[in-house]
Amino acid sequence: MLNIENKDKFAKVIADAIAKVELTVKDAQTKKRWVKAIAKAVAQIEANGTFMNYDTEDNHLVIWSQGSDEVYSANGVCQCEAYARGLACWHRAASRLVRIYLGLDENTAPKFSAKAKEEITYLPNTREPIRVENYGSVRLPVYN
Ligand SMILES: [Zn+2]
């Protein structure tokens, strides 16, 4: 269960995240998607934090999605459909917000851990990204 106790600190993390997207994401469409993903992440954390847990050992956020009744685990990678299509998703936005809020270092987060890769291959239409680009500290997969 995820409980954001320090609302002021969390608000600052959110503001920083949006500012970072504004400053570092060049493509207007991608920018819009990430800002929306952050907004949805905040709403979800506030409403459904009970169904989330931050795994500090593996440095990823585990989300039980109420809408799809699926469990997502997100850091730089995710198991959702948006991620499979190379788009922004709120799971990863949420994971990043919570990680920063908890004061955990990004470098300790696995980029493409063996476990994450294994999970990705479960998706039917998943392709391997040719590389991963950093937009600030948001990682986005790039496809051919
Ligand atoms: Zn996702």
Image (cartoon, grey):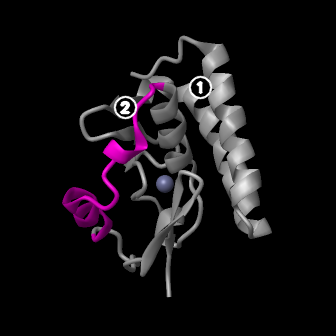
Q: What residue appears at the point 25 percent right and 58 percent down from the top-left corner?
A: 113
Residue 40 percent location from the top left of the image = 65, 42
What amino acid does circle 2 point to? Tyr
Q: What residue appears at the point 56 percent right and 46 percent down from the top-left corner?
A: 93
Q: Secondary structure at mark 1?
A: helix
Instruction: Give the magenta part as a residue range.
Output: 102-121
- Residue 31's tag is none
- Residue 54's tag is 2
Q: Is residue 114 left or right of residue 65?
A: left
Find the residue positioned furthest to the top: 5
Q: Is residue 97 left or right of residue 30?
A: left
- Of circles 1 and 2, which is in front? 2
Residue 126 is inside the magenta segment: no
Residue assigned mark 1: 47
Residue 104 is inside the magenta segment: yes
Q: What residue appears at the point 52 percent right and 27 percent down from the top-left corner?
A: 101
Q: Which of the 4 image quarters holds residue 30?
A: bottom right
Q: Secondary structure at mark 2?
A: strand
- Regarding residue 36, the answer to whether it shows in the image is no
What amino acid does circle 1 point to? Ala
Along the viewing direction, whichever of 59 and 67 lies nearer the viewer: 59
